[in-house]
Amino acid sequence: MGFKVCIVGATGAVGVEFMQVLERRNFPVDQLLLLASKRSAGTKLTFKGQPHVVQELTKDSFKGMDLALFSAGSGISKDYRQACVEAGCLMVDNSSAFRMEDGVPLVVPEINPQEAAKALQRNGGKGVIANPNCTTIIALMALAPLHREAGIKRLVAATYQAASGAGHAAMVELEESTKAYLAGQSYTPKVLPHPYAFNLFPHNSPMTANGYCEEEIKLAKESRKILADNSPAITGTCVRVPVLRTHAEALNVEFHKPLSVARAYEILGKTVGVTVLEDRAKNRWAMPIDVAGHDDVYVGRIREDLSQANTLDVWVVGDQLLKGAALNAVQCAEVALVGKLAPNANR
Ligand code: A2P
């Protein structure tokens, strides 16, 4: 038995990945409905070798559908939630709109799959699953198993975030501004607030009164919700770097209990969805170009922090469009509707 699936924001950076992930993981799709704004209505996209025409999103789009994968921004998610849920269609939402709402499960299927079922128990059987922030998912793929072992006391994160997190237009801006720079031409940024070619800048999410940007706050709050533990102290500095689609993160993690480097590698070596890439002799670790297009989150460079007891430094790299967005969302649908996860692919 298959499902009637719609993608909201099908023409966007994550929307296109939704289609590829559904196809690659053989998600049981009986019918696929591609939805975007009026601007893209009529555009043809290919799914399983067949052309599909993009339709304009309306409140009636969800009638008769089983699953809606949303990636068209928070505003669209808020505007269309009621229509989706009332139509009896499970909403898996990639935006930040409902992540911290009580009763909305925030799910990383390798960490808290049991939460996904809660969405199905609400609203007469169907509801909303929130897909966490990309940086948070990628960090927690490495940290959740270590937290279970030794308890995270404090996390200090430094992130190196790709253009894809700001959408397709930001990826185009990175490419075009780089070409312009190399051609000696001027380029005025249209999507991001600062020149992107051969540059980096603090994350472009809105700044808050305490000096943290929203991305840094999401990392702290969402991590605690996913771990179902409010005790870890979490701080971070999120930075946008000129990389197309894969985030890297340097995590300094203090634990309550001693955790050796060897034991951390042993745990992560057995963690589903994590690949350990460790070559100390060659000083060779996972880089965005290794991980782009891969489902797993790559981990390595685990070392003892010589400045403080019970503390490890960990290097984590994950494809923002896959585990940070489309893959995690499709996996949420797998655990909620199919009852099991399909295997990952690392190409
Ligand atoms: P469209 O291509 O018609 O603008 P990204 O995250 O890469 O920026 O993509 C955003 C996605 O959200 C696109 O598919 C975009 O469609 C879609 N979108 C933006 N505004 C709307 C809207 N008002 N109604 C439906 N989809 C929208």
Image (tube, grey):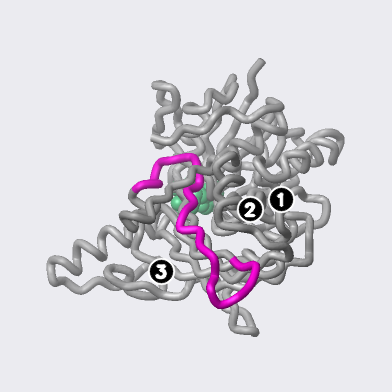
Please name the residue shown 34% across and 55% down the image.
281
Give percent across and percent down for residue 207. 57, 78
Please name the residue shown 71% across and 36% down the image.
90
Q: Do callouts 2 and 1 mark residues in contact (Cβ within 8 Å)?
A: yes
Name the quadrant of the C terminus: top left
Name the quadrant of the N terminus: top right
Residue picked out by circle 1: 106
CA separation in Å, label 2 and label 3: 22 Å
Q: Nearer the viewer, residue 109 or 283?
A: 283
The part of the image, by quadrant, that contains residue 305 is: bottom right
Is 151 one of the magenta-colored residues?
A: no
Tell me which numbered mark, 3 or 1, is placed earlier along the sequence: 1
Vertically, is 120 above or below 48? below
**Amino acid marked by disc 2:** Pro
Give percent across and percent down for residue 231. 78, 66
Q: Do callouts 2 and 3 mark residues in contact (Cβ within 8 Å)?
A: no
Residue picked out by circle 2: 132
**Amino acid marked by disc 3:** Leu
Disc 3 is placed on an element classified as loop
Please name the residue shown 34% across and 64% down the image.
242
**Amino acid marked by disc 1:** Leu
Q: Is residue 185 left or right of residue 293?
A: left
CA separation in Å, label 2 and label 1: 6 Å
Tell me which numbered mark, 2 or 1, is placed earlier along the sequence: 1
Residue picked out by circle 3: 192
Q: Nearer the viewer, residue 27 or 7?
A: 27
Q: Which residues are magenta?
A: 290-311
The part of the image, by quadrant, that contains residue 99 is: bottom right
Is 309 one of the magenta-colored residues?
A: yes
Q: Do callouts 3 and 1 mark residues in contact (Cβ within 8 Å)?
A: no
CA separation in Å, label 3 and label 1: 28 Å
Q: Residue furthest top?
A: 1
